[in-house]
């Protein structure tokens, strides 16, 4: 499926049973609900999908289940988040065979590569797949920056087409646009600067909190696209307390708890993560319930 690189692409959760096995049916139900609510693409097995807590075979089962339920309605990208280049290539090749429409490629996990090593990692994966690739830049989380020099070195890799930008400094969007023009499609990757990113040149949004409030997320992007800036700002201000959760270290647990409160999934996670407890759990529940009680009806109507 050809990817239209725009709109809302939730980084979806992987649903877990009480015995910590993967609940493929629940994962499919959650993904189907998001698609029915209007999202434009799916990111399976990103950070929110607990990629690095899953075995290779488990990842492929999840990916197959997601692509099956998507059924060509929207494109499905999968995270490629591995310790080294060999493992990344192995998974990328398997994901292509499993029916993924594209890859979201991360730097190597744990090891912090030098610039030439990072280029070689991305190039090594890109040259072993025909799938289009979105690179994922998140220096606070992965201690590695995909800077302009890295992107310049990758300019000729035709299937590296997009960058998910999760650096909190939104000046990056302008700098990258000035440096590369339309060569790389830019996506907002950090929920609580999404509006700024979309105004500064991002054409889409890889979102975590969309898992709990998909209609509002779609409505926010739709308002920007039609030039209704007052509506976009209204939705964004309503959404912001929850969007801040995406920048916290416990974002996976918080997003899955938000899903559960909204009746869209379970808060169960895989170790080493555990569900939120105590004051933090109560805080997140209160935030979600407050958002649900005050959700902007204009956003829901716009997304319907």
Image: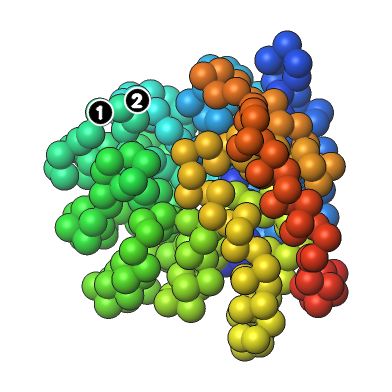
Asked whether disc 1 touches disc 2, contact meaning CB atoms under 8 Å apart, the reply is yes
Q: Nearer the viewer, residue 273 or 69?
A: 273
- Dot placed on the residue nearer the N-terminal end, 1 or 2: 2
Element at label 2: loop
Q: CA distance from mark 1 to mark 2?
A: 7 Å
At horizontal 27% and vertical 72% (from top left) the residue drawn is 175
The residue at which mark 2 appears reads as 83
Instruction: Sort mark 2 into few (<14), some (14-19) or many (20+) by Cα contacts within 10 Å.
Output: some
Left or right position of 266 against 202: right
- Label 1 or label 2, whichever lies nearer to me, is 1
The residue at which mark 1 appears reads as 111
At horizontal 79% and vertical 42% (from top left) the residue drawn is 261
Q: Is residue 56 visible?
A: no
At horizontal 66% and vertical 44% (from top left) the residue drawn is 284
Q: Picture coordinates of residue 128 (x, y %)?
A: 37, 36
Left or right position of 303 against 4: right
Q: Picture coordinates of residue 249 (x, y %)?
A: 47, 38
Residue 222 to residue 188: above or below: below
Residue furthest to the top? 19
């Amino acid at each position: 499926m050809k990817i239209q690189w725009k709109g809302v692409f939730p980084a979806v959760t992987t649903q877990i049973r009480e015995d910590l096995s993967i609940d493929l049916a629940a994962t499919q139900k959650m993904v189907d609900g998001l698609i029915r609510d209007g999202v434009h693409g799916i990111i399976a097995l990103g950070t929110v999908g607990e990629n690095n807590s899953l075995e290779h075979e488990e990842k492929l089962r999840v990916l197959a289940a997601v692509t099956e339920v998507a059924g060509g309605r929207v494109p499905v990208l999968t995270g490629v988040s591995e310790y080294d280049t060999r493992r990344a290539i192995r998974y990328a090749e398997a994901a292509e065979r499993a029916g993924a429409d594209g890859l979201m490629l991360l730097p190597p996990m744990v090891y912090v590569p030098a610039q030439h090593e990072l280029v070689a990692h991305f190039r090594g994966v890109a040259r072993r797949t025909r799938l289009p690739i979105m690179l994922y830049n998140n220096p606070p989380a992965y201690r590695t920056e995909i800077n302009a020099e890295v992107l310049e070195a990758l300019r000729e890799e035709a299937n590296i087409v997009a960058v998910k930008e999760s650096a909190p400094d939104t000046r990056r969007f302008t700098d990258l646009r000035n440096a590369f023009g339309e060569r790389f499609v830019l996506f907002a990757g950090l929920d609580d600067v999404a509006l700024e990113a979309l105004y500064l040149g991002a054409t889409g949004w890889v979102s975590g909190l969309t898992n709990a409030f998909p209609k509002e997320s779609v409505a926010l992007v739709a308002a920007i696209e039609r030039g209704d800036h007052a509506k976009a700002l209204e939705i964004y201000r309503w959404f912001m307390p929850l969007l801040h959760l995406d920048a916290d270290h416990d974002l996976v647990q918080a997003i899955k708890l938000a899903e559960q409160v909204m009746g869209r999934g379970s808060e169960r996670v895989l170790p080493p993560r555990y569900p939120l407890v105590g004051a933090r759990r109560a805080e997140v529940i209160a935030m979600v319930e407050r958002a649900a009680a005050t959700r902007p009806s204009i956003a829901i109507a716009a997304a319907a």
